[in-house]
Image (tube, rainbow, N blue to C red):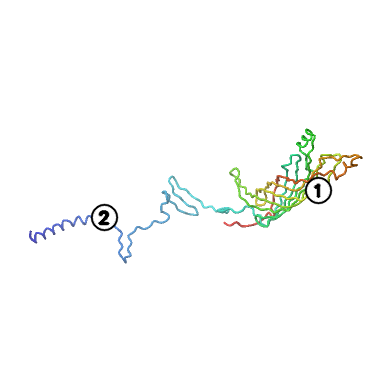
């Protein structure tokens, strides 16, 4: 084949392919092109923030302090409201005790003496030198409120034996208090109460005397004063930042002077007037644990105690 024939074939093939190339270029989508150093931008303009669709097909716009939300089924308007109270991520102590005076009137009942019931009215006063440590005094008055129980009467009638029992006049002590635990609990899924658990211990005096149970026709006793050691554990439930309820278990430890269960003979031959001599009335001295439960109302002063809680 000659050179002229090959040249004619190539020219014919080129002319026939020109319409197909032009049609392919017209149908292809335009691609953004940006040459180096060119300022031309072929990207689509961004939509305004007000018209951008929200997640889930919602669209929204704000006007006049209200947020308009377009949701399927209608339009919802959300109003802006200011908070009326502060919200704290970690709630601090509800009622601070530091540098406050606590006064607590109480009612006390004995638990471990089956032969006589000791009931007393008391008052506790504590000054809190820190939020968990306090020094104070406690006092309980019992005179006139000591009642022999029915157990003592039934034992005496059935066995012809009398158990020596004692009555209390008052107890007073200086105590140190410490708060190791505090928290809060919910009641009825509606009310929230704050509480703390405290322990206290101290030293003081106890005034008591025996009941004239063995020979009541002859014997009368005076009040004795003994050294008292007390250890207490209690819980305080707050109704407000200054008022609460206290429940306390107390243990008073002291030496108790008991009545002599034997009656000295009273005859001219053996011992004239021995029965009426008070030197024969007292029996042994025994270390006594008086366990009591105390219920009281606690008040912290001053009422208007201002402090700030960190957010």
Residue drawn 83% across and 44% down? 221
Query: If you read the primary sequence from the N terminus, does the residue marked by circle 2 or circle 1 appear first?
Result: 2
Name the residue beneath numbered marker 1: 224
Which residue occupies the foreground of this view, 124 or 279?
A: 279
Q: Position of residue 127 (x, y in %)?
A: 70, 55
Indicate the quadrant where residue 42 lies: bottom left
- Residue 259 point in image, percent of width and height: 81, 43
| Label 2 to label 1: alpha-carbon separation | 116 Å
Q: Alpha-carbon neighbours of circle 1 within 10 Å: few (<14), some, or many (≥20)? A: some
129 shown above or below 161: below
Question: Residue 219 versus residue 64: which sits nearer the camera?
Answer: 219
Q: Quadrant of the N terminus?
A: bottom left
In the image, taking residue 62 as reference, residue 278 lies left or right, namely right
Q: Residue furthest front?
A: 269
Point out the image quarter for the C terminus: bottom right
Q: Position of residue 235 (x, y in %)?
A: 66, 48
Marks 2/1 in contact by CB < 8 Å: the verdict is no
Secondary structure type for disc 1: strand
Query: Which residue position holds label 2?
Result: 28
Secondary element under disc 2, as helix, strand or loop, is loop
Of residue 113 and residue 2, the one placed in the foreground of this image is 113
Which of discs 2 and 1 lies nearer the camera? The answer is 1
Q: Residues within 10 Å of mark 2 (few under 14, many from 20)?
A: few
Q: Is residue 194 above or below residue 154?
A: below
């Amino acid at each position: 084949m000659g050179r002229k024939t090959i040249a004619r074939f190539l020219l014919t093939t080129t002319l026939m392919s020109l319409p197909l190339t032009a049609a392919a270029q017209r149908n292809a989508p335009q691609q953004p092109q940006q040459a180096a150093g060119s300022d031309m931008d072929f990207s689509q303009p961004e939509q305004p923030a007000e018209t951008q669709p929200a997640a889930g097909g919602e669209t929204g716009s704000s006007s006049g302090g209200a947020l308009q939300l377009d949701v399927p089924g209608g339009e919802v308007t959300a109003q802006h409201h200011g908070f009326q109270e502060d919200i704290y991520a970690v709630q601090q102590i509800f009622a601070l005790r530091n540098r406050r005076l606590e006064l607590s009137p109480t009612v006390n009942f004995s638990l471990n003496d089956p032969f006589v019931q000791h009931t007393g009215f008391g008052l506790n006063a504590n000054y809190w030198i820190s939020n968990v440590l306090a020094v104070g005094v406690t006092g309980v008055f019992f005179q006139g409120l000591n009642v022999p129980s029915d157990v003592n009467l039934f034992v005496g009638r059935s066995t012809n034996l009398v158990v020596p029992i004692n009555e209390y006049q008052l107890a007073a002590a200086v105590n140190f208090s410490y708060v190791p635990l505090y928290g809060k609990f919910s009641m009825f899924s509606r009310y929230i109460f704050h509480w703390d658990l405290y322990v206290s211990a101290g030293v003081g005096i106890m005034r008591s005397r025996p009941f004239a149970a063995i020979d009541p026709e002859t014997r009368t006793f005076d009040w004795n004063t003994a050294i008292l050691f007390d250890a207490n554990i209690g819980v305080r439930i707050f109704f407000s930042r200054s008022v609460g309820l206290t429940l306390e278990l107390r243990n008073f430890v002291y030496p108790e002077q008991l009545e002599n269960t034997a009656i000295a003979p009273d005859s001219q031959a053996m011992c004239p007037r021995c029965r009426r001599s008070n030197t024969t009335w007292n029996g042994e001295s025994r270390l006594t644990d008086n366990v009591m439960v105390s219920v009281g109302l606690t008040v912290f002063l001053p009422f208007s105690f201002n402090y700030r809680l960190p957010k």
